[in-house]
Image (cartoon, helix red, strand yellow):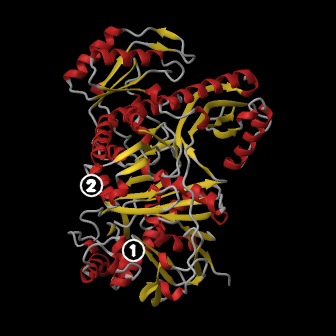
């Protein structure tokens, strides 16, 4: 038995699976600030099943919440002399170029808590000025007086030689054992001084709160359950042990959302779809990611709080490439100063929630709009729904402003929400040179199935898949993940100067480190698999292209260079075959493989009429109110095609199929939606 839980902004989701491939799901409300209580609540919902398990996997929003809400620890920074202001200087390529009032992001460490030491390394990692213990002692005394709770250490060129950072951390532990310490070289060995320093600072900033949360969760679980192995989901799409997560919590910054992307990739393997757009709509946000040829895309150029007006904060750790916007079921509809209708990014959350919840919410949300237009039924809510209150809120806050009916206002809210989500989908497909028609849209989360069919029509996607356990699919994805560690080392060298022996030596060194760390986690060497990537560029360029290299083909430099030319043209529309190339980073990914549960085939052969729940009026654009058949997903007969418009209901989710579409349930229980041929 395996159990996975995923904490979202509104709900905490759970999926379990046994050795025969039988799945079960549960949901409970998220319980901030003590998120661990929500985990125990949802475990209690599955009774004795939640007491014992071979494996427990957990995804959490605790880290990203602590960063965005500025609820981390009071943090100090120790850095090389002359570099205390690197967090202030940041980057010159600001996003809002013509805004004369533009302000750079405010550092997470105030200037008086940024201290310098006279140590210095050159770019080769050679010592120019030694590290002095007396300077560290003086800084620690100052930090103690200021009641600092965590310390980040980031020295110049420590990605090449971490000697001084390691020594500093050792001295700090001797002088002040209670304080949390992060060395930049422990988190990343990739260059970029500002990005590396900021990553170390953010890790230190959330380290105390992450450690406390994980300990509380461990204690709660040990009191209520007996799990043989416990893991936490990382942003790179893999899992790690609890202890490792305490030391490097920044690797969990997108812990929950990436699991759904991994799940979409695994599901794609099962159903024969390699090119996928994974689309997750929850209560607060909508997230999407592109999977090409079964490969989930990762990036170390990840930012929090970045948009077209704000530079955000860089995090130099591998994160699944996700576009996220503030639109979900709880997103509030409002009118801006110019009189335009907006939806999100503000959310009503789990409490007070949408007006439909009856918990004190007064602002109309996407959920309220879907309820009023008949897409959702009040009979399926956990709360007593006052439909007149929902209608009143939409009419007074939106409808009267535009002199339209409540139904038209509700449809307007849905269209604006869809437009926001469509822009996100374009950012990870069309804007990056991909044709959406070549991809299958796998939609999940509480709102994914409701909005995805409409978005597919606008985007030109030919097939939409609503997977089994779609409302809790991110938790389902965690059950399909391996343990994963990424090792990135900046090593700038021209390809024509790099010997194959040198290349092989560097890779073997990284492999040895990976095997050592997996061994410490109890993973046998026979279960470890490697993938190698090289970040390459043309000489004199700034940007790089990630080239996958077969470990058995390390000595074929010509093939590696040709592959780089090919990928460069794909990404940037041109290449320069005559120009010299160079390596910037080695990126080794190590997987600790775990046995994954298989999807179980099942067939339902009875008549379609047995699955019909009712015929309900649904308000569609250009069609008005349409009597629409509503079916129970669990009772739908296998592989029987149904033409839209139609509504498919399941626990915690609804699928809306439009007039020009058709839907069927496959042998795995997935819903397959395609455009009907004319």
Residue lying at 39% horizontally and 58% vertically, measured from the top left: 14
User: Relative to 370, is 596 on the left or the right?
Assistant: right
User: Relative to 608, is 117 on the left or the right?
Assistant: left
Question: Mark 1 Cα within 10 Å, few/some/many (few <14, many 20+)?
Answer: many
Residue 127 versus residue 145 in the image, above or below: above
The secondary structure type at the circle numbered 1 is: helix
Q: Nearer the viewer, residue 586 or 244?
A: 244
Q: Which of 280 and 108 is in front in this view?
A: 280
The secondary structure type at the circle numbered 2 is: loop
Which mark lies nearer to you, 2 or 1?
2
Q: Position of residue 578 (x, y in %)?
A: 80, 35
Q: Which of 68 and 579 is in front in this view?
A: 68
User: Picture quarter containing residue 327?
Assistant: bottom left
User: Relative to 673, is 500 on the left or the right?
Assistant: right
Residue lying at 44% horizontally and 21% vertically, measured from the top left: 155
Q: Name the residue under label 2.
A: 31
Q: Position of residue 288 (x, y in %)?
A: 51, 58
Residue 215 versus residue 505 in the image, above or below: below
Q: Name the residue under label 1.
A: 413
Residue lying at 53% horizontally and 66% vertically, measured from the top left: 467
Distance Cα–Cα, label 2 vs label 1: 28 Å
User: Relative to 605, is 98 on the left or the right?
Assistant: left
Q: Which label sits on residue 437?
A: none
Compare marks 2 and 1 and give the one earlier in the sequence. 2
Q: Is residue 282 at all visible to an observer of this figure?
A: no
Q: Nearer the viewer, residue 12 or 190?
A: 12
């Amino acid at each position: 038995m395996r159990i996975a839980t995923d904490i979202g902004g509104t709900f905490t989701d759970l999926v379990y699976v046994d050795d025969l491939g039988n799945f079960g799901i549960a949901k409970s409300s998220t319980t901030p600030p003590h998120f661990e209580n929500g985990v125990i609540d949802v475990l209690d919902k599955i009774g004795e099943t939640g007491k014992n398990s071979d494996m427990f996997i957990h995804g959490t929003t605790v880290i990203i919440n602590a960063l965005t809400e500025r609820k981390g620890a009071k943090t100090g920074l120790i850095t090389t002399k002359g570099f205390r202001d690197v967090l202030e200087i940041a980057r010159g390529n600001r996003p809002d170029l013509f805004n004369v009032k533009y302000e750079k992001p405010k550092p997470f460490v105030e200037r008086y808590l940024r201290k310098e030491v006279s140590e210095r390394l050159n770019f080769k990692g050679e010592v120019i000025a030694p590290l002095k213990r007396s300077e560290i002692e003086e800084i620690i005394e100052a930090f103690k007086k200021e009641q600092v709770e965590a310390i980040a250490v980031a020295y110049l060129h420590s990605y090449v030689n971490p000697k001084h950072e390691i020594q500093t951390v050792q001295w700090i532990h001797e002088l002040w054992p209670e304080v949390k310490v992060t060395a930049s070289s422990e988190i990343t060995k990739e260059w970029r001084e500002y990005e590396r320093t900021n990553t170390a600072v953010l890790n230190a900033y959330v380290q105390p709160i992450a450690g406390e949360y994980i300990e509380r969760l461990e204690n709660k679980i040990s009191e209520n359950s007996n799990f043989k192995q416990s893991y936490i989901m990382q942003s790179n799409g893999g899992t790690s042990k609890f202890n490792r997560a305490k030391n490097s919590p920044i690797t969990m910054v997108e812990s929950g959302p990436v699991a759904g992307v991994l799940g979409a990739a695994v599901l794609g393997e099962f159903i024969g779809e390699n090119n996928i757009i994974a689309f997750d709509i929850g209560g607060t946000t909508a997230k999407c990611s592109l999977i090409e040829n079964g490969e989930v895309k990762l990036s170390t150029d990840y930012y929090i709080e970045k948009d077209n007006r704000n530079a955000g904060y860089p995090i130099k750790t591998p994160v699944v490439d996700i576009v996220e916007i503030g639109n979900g079921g709880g997103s509030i509809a409002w009118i801006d100063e110019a009189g335009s209708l907006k939806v999100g990014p503000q959310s009503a959350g789990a409490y007070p929630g949408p007006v439909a919840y009856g918990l004190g919410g007064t602002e109309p949300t996407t959920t309220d709009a879907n309820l009023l237009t008949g897409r959702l039924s009040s009979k399926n809510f956990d709360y007593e729904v006052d439909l007149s209150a929902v209608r009143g809120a939409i009419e007074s806050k939106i409808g009267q402003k535009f002199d339209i009916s409540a139904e038209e206002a509700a449809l307007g809210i849905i269209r604006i929400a869809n437009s926001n989500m469509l822009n996100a989908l374009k950012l990870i497909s069309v804007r990056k040179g991909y044709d959406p028609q070549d991809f299958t849209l796998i939609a999940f989360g509480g709102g994914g199935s409701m909005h995805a069919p409409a978005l597919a029509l606008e985007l030109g996607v030919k097939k939409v898949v609503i997977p089994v356990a779609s409302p809790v699919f991110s938790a389902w994805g965690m059950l399909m993940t391996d343990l994963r560690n990424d090792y990135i080392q900046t090593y700038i060298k021209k390809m024509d100067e790099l010997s194959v022996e040198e290349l092989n030596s560097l890779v073997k060194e990284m492999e040895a480190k990976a095997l050592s760390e997996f061994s410490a986690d109890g993973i046998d060497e026979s279960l470890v698999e490697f993938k190698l990537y090289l970040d390459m560029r043309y000489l004199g360029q700034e940007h790089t292209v990630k080239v996958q290299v077969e470990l058995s083909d390390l000595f074929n430099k010509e093939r590696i260079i040709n592959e780089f030319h090919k990928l460069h043209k794909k990404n940037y529309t041109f290449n320069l075959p005559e120009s010299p190339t160079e390596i910037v980073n080695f990126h080794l990914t190590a997987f600790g493989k775990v046995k994954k549960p298989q999807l179980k085939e099942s067939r339902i052969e009875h008549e379609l009429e047995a699955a019909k729940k009712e015929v309900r009026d649904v308000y569609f654009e250009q069609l008005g109110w349409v009597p629409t058949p509503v079916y129970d997903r669990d009772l739908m007969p296998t592989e029987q095609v149904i033409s839209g418009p139609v509504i498919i209901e399941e626990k915690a989710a609804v699928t809306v199929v439009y007039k020009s579409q058709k839907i069927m349930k496959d042998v795995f229980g997935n819903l397959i939606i395609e455009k009907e041929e004319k």
